Image (tube, grey):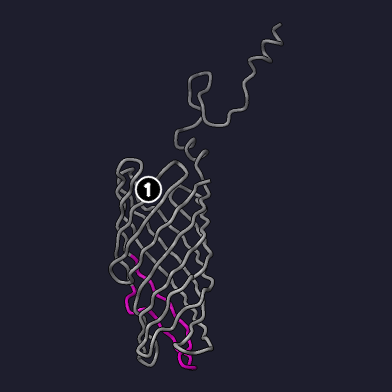
Amino acid sequence: MAAIGLLGFRAAEAKACGVSASGVASCSLAEHEEAVRRRWVIGANGLFTSTRLRFSDDLHADQVRYATLAMLAYLPSTRLVLQAGAGAALGGGLTLADGEYRFSPGPTAMIGADFRAFDDGRYSLLLTSGLSFATARTRAPGAGSSEAYTAFDLRLGVQFGIALGRVVVPYAVARVFGGPIFWRYQGQAVTGTDTHHYQLGAGLALRATKALSFFVEGIPLGERAVALGVSWAL
């Protein structure tokens, strides 16, 4: 009977932190939160940008681009986020004095890292970085042939947010960026870059559930942009 009783009341393997028989916690709250923390995030972003470019030979162009990215992020700690994305530039164009050069769809990719420098539950400060690549072809007005267009971009930013409860986080964002653009204009190779190497704007993050989040962002100053996205924590 004693053996049956011991088997019947045998404790199952603990899956999280608990309390020992002496009343001493077997692990701290911080250790428990780290043990159950979600470490992977998948998501999808949509992006619209509008900016002015300056190419060699004093050539200027107004650029509009649309793109979408699938994202994968890994959180090795509560402060650090490592992420990568791949997708497609869906269209847009370059407007010059002689007309509009339309973009064909083309691949785009990025890698980045974010660091949460400060977070007291109410206010947060996030440092961001990202390196991106995009390529497409442009078609001149009335021309049958197209030319290659390739752009590289490195961005560094800071994002300051204020949590309103546990659901809504409005934030302000500032970024600086730069990178070369390689294009062929009227058969000649030209190199360009943005005339504005900064972004100033704001956004809103919404946490629908513990796993599901949304964001929308608007950038009216510098390189103008509108972005929106959804993510799911695993």
Q: Does the magenta stretch include residue 192?
A: yes
Q: Give the camera-side residue of 63 and 27.
A: 63
- Where is residue 39 shown, x and y percent of the image? 52, 47
Q: Which residue was labeled with disc 1?
A: 206
- Where is residue 24 shown, x and y percent of the image? 48, 23
Residue 193 position by quadrant:
bottom left
Dot 1 lies on which element?
Answer: strand
Residue 202 position by quadrant:
bottom left
Q: In this view, does 151 lie above or below 112?
A: below
Who's the residue at 35% across and 91% down the image?
58
- Where is residue 213 shown, x and y percent of the image? 43, 48
Q: Please tell me whether the stretch drawn in magenta is mainly helix, strand or loop.
A: strand
Who's the residue at 35% across and 86% down the image?
60
Q: Give the camera-side residue of 71 and 35.
A: 71
109 on left or right of 204: right
The quadrant of the image that shows the N terminus is top right
188 on left or right of 197: right
Please state the extent of the stretch shown in magenta in the rendering: 175-197
